Amino acid sequence: MSDNIFTQYISNRNTLVKNKKALQTTYIPDQLPHRTDQINEIVSIFSAALYGDKPSNIMIFGKTGTGKTAVMSYIGQELKKADPNEDKSVYVYVNCEVVDTPYSILYNIANQIIPDSEMRIPFTGWVTDKVYNELREYIDKKRKVFIIVLDEIDRLFAKAGEDIFYLLTIINEVLTNSKVSLVGISNNPKFIEFMDPKVRSRLGEVRIIFPSYDASQLEDILQARALMAFEDGILEDGVVPYCAALAAQDTGDARRSLDLLRIAADIAERNGDPSVTEAHVKSAKNKIELDAVAEVVRTLPSQSKTVLMSIIVNTEEGHNKMTTGMVFSTYKEVCNLIGCSILTQRRISDFISELDMLGIIYARVISLGRSGRTKEIELSISKDVINIIKNDDMFRNVSSYHPSKQMTLI
Ligand SMILES: Nc1ncnc2c1ncn2[C@@H]1O[C@H](COP(=O)(O)OP(=O)(O)OP(=O)(O)O)[C@@H](O)[C@H]1O
Ligand SMILES: [Mg+2]
């Protein structure tokens, strides 16, 4: 290839990660350390399907990043290997985060198992009963065991109520040739208590818990992924244990530990460094935290953003600490500049408490002697996050504004 403006980037590209996929959170490894008991239990239940019997319905609970989705994807792949032509069993996986109405659940299941495009169910236009009846008839004709995995099932329950679970759990009573077995996955064990007891007991015939990982378990998980991702000598010794320890301190979330390792390697690559060190992990941790705060700030409701902008304006005028009254008087001026309605000081005080709870500002109650009490407020976000608000389109008229001299203290 002849030289052009891209050449220097191609030849100088510093690649520390030989297999990036292995560090992606969507990658399903062949080995899932510390989940053998759960895998064995589920596989022994599912094996009934290979003899034509109905496996018990299962509810899987565990906090975020405890391997629930990974384990079920792995088992799904293995089931396909055991029954490659789907002679006995059909495995259907639905993520209810994206599919959240009874119609769309049935539509999604139906269109995963009905290959013939002529017979497919339309995206909209039918009543739910009709979709259900078509699906039931199709399933029964196949004379197989259908295992339907509903991931993030609590979201479906929150949005669509329990009718859909009722329909799916009683389906076996109207099937003569086929059987349907359900697996629900959730990181919120509470949701099931709100279900009708009958549906609840049908759905959770077997309950399996995925406990959170401790630091040494996370280290094993991460070590296995690191071996796939890096050549020898690229990772400094302390890196994997450090990522594991940080994630264990949080919630024992394997996704978080992988994120730390992947982002640390990314930072090292971009710096042109020869290896990944604990310092890179520290930067990765800061980046993750910054990104999380930035996301919260970006998605604040506009009134809340306006209050935050008023606090930023005052800070930049040299008032590092300010009272609720000062925020309110700046807020009124900012509202006029951006053309939004002005809420009462009481409401603004509520927004201030919310921003405090989110960790965006720091507010403490102080006494003003006879004048009563107020809050002393200061920002607790970095320059980068402050800039997200300042650059928000809604504040384009505020850039050259200075608040008028304020006498209000409370
Ligand atoms: N035992 C394990 N071995 C290897 N990788 C694992 C293991 N457990 C989890 N992981 C990895 O950690 C990441 C998060 O796991 P997973 O998505 O399965 O979590 P989850 O329990 O489904 O979380 P959520 O409740 O947030 O959906 C994935 O990349 C997965 O591959
Ligand atoms: Mg999951």
Image (cartoon, rainbow, N blue to C red):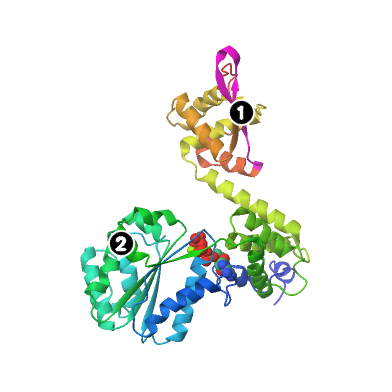
The residue indicated by pointer 1 is: 314
Q: Which residues are magenta?
A: 365-383
Query: Which comes before the other along the chain, label 2 or label 1?
Result: 2
Query: Residue 146: percent from the left, percent from the top?
Result: 34, 77
Q: Do callouts 2 and 1 mark residues in contact (Cβ within 8 Å)?
A: no
Above/below status of 66 relative to 329: below
Query: Residue 219: percent from the left, percent from the top?
Result: 67, 66
Q: Which numbered disc covers residue 398?
A: none
180, 400: nearer the viewer: 180
Q: Whereabouts is ligand 1, in terms of quadrant? A: bottom right
Q: Left or right: 107 with respect to 221?
A: left
Q: Residue at x 71, y 58 (%)?
A: 281
Above/below status of 334 relative to 149: above
Q: Left or right: 162 with respect to 318?
A: left
Q: Residue at x 57, y 74 (%)?
A: 29
Q: Helix or strand or loop: what does disc 1 sit on?
A: helix
- Cα gap from disc 2 to disc 1, whole angstroms: 56 Å
- Residue at disc 1, CB closer than 8 Å to ligand 1: no
Q: Residues within 10 Å of mark 2 (few under 14, many from 20)?
A: some
100, 402: nearer the viewer: 100
Q: Residues within 10 Å of mark 1 (few under 14, many from 20)?
A: many
Q: Is residue 371 magenta?
A: yes
Above/below status of 268 relative to 38: above
Nearer to us: label 2 or label 1 = 2
Query: Residue 407: percent from the left, percent from the top?
Result: 58, 16
The residue indicated by pointer 2 is: 199
Q: Residue furthest top?
A: 370
